[in-house]
Image (spheres, helix red, strand yellow):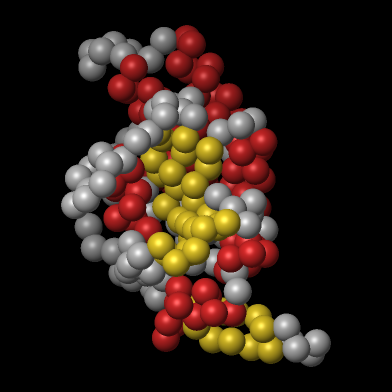
Amino acid sequence: MILLGPNGGGKTTLFRALTGELAPSGGTVTIRGRLAYLPQYDDSRLDFPVSVLDVVQMGTLPERRPWQRAGKAVRSRSLEALKRVGLADSAKDSYGELSGGQRRRVLLARTIVQDSETLLLDEPLAGVDPASSEVIRATLDRLRDEGRLVIVASHDVDHARASDRVLCLNRKLLANGAPTEVMTDQVLRETYASDLTVVTSADGTPLFAAAEHHHHHGH
């Protein structure tokens, strides 16, 4: 499922409400099973001497005592998660020395290792190289095919068209359903307001391009 909307449209706020980080101002949030959340920004210190495997194993911290070291079972699950994102051979590498796209894949593996029924992924493809983008998309498709609920926040209209369900959000829910039903000219204009460029293809089909805002994220 794709949560489609502009920057500042409320995608991250909705995720934070689902994870319990924000209390809803009205109504209730009901979650079945456990959630795993991949935030948009990674605030990890890149100069911290930590291996790729260590980062993935951090996903299992809630299920063991703070002083307990990761046992064989956790290690094997973590390696399996790394294999799913194509980085099994990098387990011993330093996390800080990886490319941005590879780090994003490691963080996805850390999310997968939590073995949750529902995965919330905030802009997992933002600023990622094409090779990593392809791996991430394929991994998310496989997770969905295994019966997990995968909710991806995105402002990529093409990505949304390829998904099985789309929620269009711009400070309020504008549409919810199959891409072919909800991604109409009118809904996309409401979703992106002034950030939308409409280009008409040769056969008269409107093609949409959402303006990307590049935020500089300060630490």
Report the side of 36 relative to 125 (left or right).
left
State the residue in front, 21 or 68. 21
Q: Residue at x 31, y 14 (%)?
A: 64
- The residue lying at 49 percent from left, 51 percent from top is 152
Q: Is residue 181 above or below residue 65?
A: below
Which residue of the protein is positioned furthest toward the right in this rendering?
Answer: 203
Position of 184 with respect to 194 (left or right) is right
Viewed as shown, does residue 68 lie left or right of 53?
Answer: left
- Answer yes or no: is residue 164 visible: yes
Snapshot quadrant of residue 87: top right
User: Residue 161: x, y in percent?
Assistant: 64, 63
At 58% from the left and 65% from the top, the residue drawn is: 182
Which quadrant: the C terminus? Answer: bottom left
Residue shown at the point (54%, 24%) measured from the top left: 79
The image position of residue 8, as x and y in percent, is: 32, 68
Q: Is residue 157 above or below residue 28?
A: below
